Amino acid sequence: MSIIRDNKTDPNKILPMTYLWAREYYKSGVANNWTPEEVSMQRDVEQWKTPDAVTDHERKLIMLNLGFFSTAESLTANNIVLALYRHITNSECRQYLLRQAFEEAIHTDTFIYCCDSLGLDPDEIYTMYERVDIIKEKDDFVVSLTKSIFDPQFEIVDDATTQQFVKDLIGYYVIMEGIFFYAGFAMMLSLKRHKKMVGIGEQFEYIMRDESLHLAFGCDLITTIIKEYPSIWTDAFKQEVVGLIKKAVELEMAYAIEACPNGLLGITSKQFCDYVQHIADRRLERLGLEKVYNKENPFLWMSEATDLSKEKNFFETRVTEYQSGGSLDWD
Ligand code: FE
Ligand code: MN
């Protein structure tokens, strides 16, 4: 019995379970269930219509983040359904992948809801991943790591193909969901802290909470594969993985600087870069690799937003919502 490369596994038999952690992620995902329509966009709509309420720079960065996330969610969902699901035959992992795929559908729905309620031009948003260089570079980088496993002929049979598969997992779980999402999260949550576009901000908070589970599942999946096939985890492969993460950090810092050349609401673009480096170190450590950047977390409030217990988040959401009509503050 192993998590991949196992042709004796019957994917239709979920009991008894081997990987109980995968089951736990499934249950946490279900406990976090939300839909975008639960979040009122009324104040956002008013602010969006009022020129002074949101500056031109803030509008530009909101659009950039909507452009990046709207298509990144689909890329992630495609990778789960079209590439990962075929190779991960273990039932409890598959059950989680189905849950995650549903969450990606919810996230996709969030951006439909934002476009609809703010009256944004979908053509502008959904073509950014082809038009806007810094978004295209991030997406192309992830896609380049994962091309081979999309090949219908691809099978995981030996160490080299296992490494290719792990590179896909690094590409989506660690780099896309674990690094490329985080400068955007920090920007959108900073706006929310200043009571700007609080509906979108709250939706980004929910997405971030989901993504932190996706990332954690992905890291457990990767470390389980490494435990079961230790011969893939060579020094050369480790170095390759570190190199990929460093490249991702460069792209994400470029994205942050492009989005906030002169900072945002008192936050400098350097602080966004420090934050990206800080979270990259956390991802490296999660994979059992040494950290590279040694940057303090400049946004402690970000970890509070992710690390709060899920049920508490939900509880507070409801209570605060009733108290202050749509705005909530978890910090
Ligand atoms: Fe997502
Ligand atoms: Mn995700």
Image (spheres, rainbow, N blue to C red):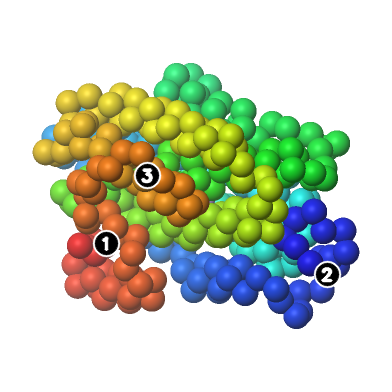
Label placed on residue 291: 3
Classify residue 237 by image quadrant.
Answer: top right
Residue in the foreground of this view, choosing between 89 and 102: 89
Looking at numbered disc 3 in the image, what kind of residue is underneath it? Lys
Residue under the image location 16 percent in, 38 percent down: 267
Residue under the image location 36 percent in, 39 percent down: 292
Say if residue 109 shows up in the picture.
Answer: no
Determine whether 187 is above or below 285 in the image.
Answer: above
Say if residue 273 shows up in the picture.
Answer: yes
Task: Return the x and y of residue 21 as percentages of the image width and height.
Answer: 58, 71
Say if disc 1 is inside 8 Å of ligand 1. no
Residue in the foreground of this view, choosing between 35 and 98: 98
Q: Is residue 328 left or right of residue 2?
A: left
Instruction: For marks 1 and 3, give the one nearer the viewer.
Output: 3
Label placed on residue 304: 1
Determine whether 253 is above or below 46 in the image.
Answer: above
